[in-house]
Image (tube, helix red, strand yellow):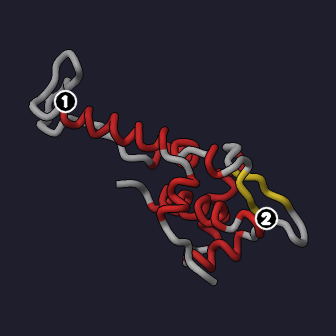
Amino acid sequence: MISVTCEYAIMATVYLAKHADECPLPARRIADALHIPRKYLSSVLHDLVRAGVLIASRGRGGGFQLQREPKDVRLQEVLAPFESQAPKRSSCSFGNAQCSENSPCATHQRWSFIDDSYRHFLEETSVYDVSIAQSAPDE
């Protein structure tokens, strides 16, 4: 339902939340622990820095960390930099040229409910919520 890039962004932020006492963490360590290609993850992490989700520090002992407490970072923020890769219904399930609230197809209301539920989930779920529900890989 979500892109690989979005999955990696969630995995990395959850990993950083679970290892906050060891931060900043180098991209190499995160990539190795999560079995994510390093170059790919590095790009994802830098996008999250530009979005204000992470802080990056250079040099020896440098790496990445969450900019705020995990309880204050919503999944919506984590996925926002990758919005173009987020799942969207771009056409009507029945092929109707116009499918909207004013001119709905047979499944429009149900799809709208799913879209609204998904958006609500991302707005209400924090990185912390996911981190306590899922154990991070041990090294």
- Name the foreground residue: 130 vs 101: 130
User: Can you say which quadrant of the picture contains the C terminus?
Assistant: bottom right
Disc 2 residue type (three-letter): Pro
Please rate how many residues cluster around mark 2, counting C-alpha atoms within 10 Å: few if below 14, some from 14 to 19, many from 20: some
Disc 1 residue type (three-letter): Gln
Please rate how many residues cluster around mark 1, counting C-alpha atoms within 10 Å: few if below 14, some from 14 to 19, many from 20: few
Q: Position of residue 53 (x, y in %)?
A: 67, 47
Nearer-N-terminus badge (1/2)? 2
What is the quadrant of residue 64 in the picture?
bottom right
Kindly state the secondary structure of the residue where label 2 is placed.
loop
Which residue in the structure is indicated by mark 1? 109
Which residue in the structure is indicated by mark 2? 24
Which residue appears at 37% of the width and 46% of the height? 87
Position of 67 with respect to 40 (left or right) is: right
Depicted 78 relative to depicted 26: above or below = above
What is the quadrant of residue 34 in the picture?
bottom right
Position of 105 with respect to 27 (left or right) is: left
Q: Position of residue 5 (x, y in %)?
A: 51, 59
